[in-house]
Amino acid sequence: MYFAYGVPVLRRLVTPRWLGALLLAGLLAYTCYHLGWWQYHRYEAKQQRNERLDTHYRATPVPLSSVLTPAGLDPDDEWTRVSVTGQYTGGPVYVRNRPLETEPGYEVLWALRPATGGPDVVVDRGWVAESQRGASVLPDVPPAPTGDVEVVGWVRPGQASRNRQLPTGQIASLNLRDATTALGSSAVLPGYVLLQSEARSDGSSAPRPQALGEPDRDLGPHQAYAYQWWLLMLAGFVLIPFGIRRELRLEDPEKYPAKPRKTRIWDEEDE
């Protein structure tokens, strides 16, 4: 009886109504295919980030100029541990909406002028919580050390601008063009340094904002989501035959009777 549906289902499938349903199933499969790859590429990007972290994060520092130049930063060099000596010339500038462990706050930027010359480099010296006097009042932050200072940290690319007008001394994202204007620098390198440590020429250190934690290495659910999207590609094609069979049963229940329901033991006992 089950196989009696085969030919009628195929005949019904070529009618305009069900050809339309087949087209919709194809569009669903096409969309799910690309959504699956979108999620998988996000998974691959996080894998590559972790590989860079494994390579660079605890490596011996290299000169900043060897990885970050006015021409740019190679994506493979992100998170390279670098060192640079110079003098702080501008700051602080507060980057808004930078929570740390769910607590609202700011990341605080300074401009460092390398002793070797060239454009300034933006240094993210760490994090500070919002002021107890409200979001409209900027919190106090330890000043940058004066004189020559050796900075060790990790080189990172800038972020996209949010194009928001904010009070003087604040920016909405770690966008280097916005930071250049806010810091009063004539030019900055196309990347910034996330501070690990800094030392004056005599080896002493100065108070600094709270250091940011190690970068997140979580791969997230993107791989699982990708597989779910790809499995969903089949959903429309699987549902169409069931829909046609249901339509046939409704039109001619004697010719296409429903599958007999199994009698369970507890049903017999109830009788």
Image (cartoon, rainbow, N blue to C red):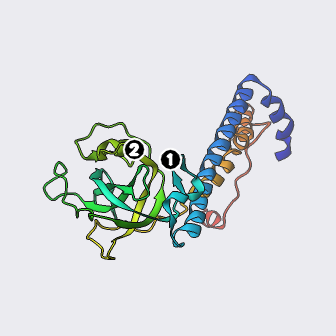
Query: Viewed as shown, does residue 179 lie left or right of 253?
Result: left
Residue 88, percent from left and from top:
31, 58
Please state which amino acid type lies under the numbered disc 2: Ala
Q: Name the residue under label 2.
A: 187
The residue located at (48%, 59%) in the rendering is 155
The residue located at (18%, 60%) in the rendering is 140
The residue located at (51%, 54%) in the rendering is 68
Q: Name the residue under label 1.
A: 70
Task: Name the element at disc 2.
Answer: loop
Q: Dot 1, crowdedness within 10 Å: few (<14), some or many (≥20)?
A: few
For this orientation, the residue located farthest to the top is 16
For this orientation, the residue located farthest to the bottom is 203
The answer to whether the residues at label 1 and label 2 have Cβ atoms under 8 Å apart is yes
**In this view of the protein, which residue sits in the foreground, 171 or 185?**
185
Residue 1 in view, yes or no? no
Query: Viewed as shown, does residue 19 lie left or right of 214?
Result: right
Residue 112, percent from left and from top:
36, 56
Q: Which comes sooner in the sequence, label 1 or label 2?
A: 1
**In this view of the protein, which residue sits in the foreground, 180 or 247?**
180
Task: Name the element at disc 1.
Answer: loop
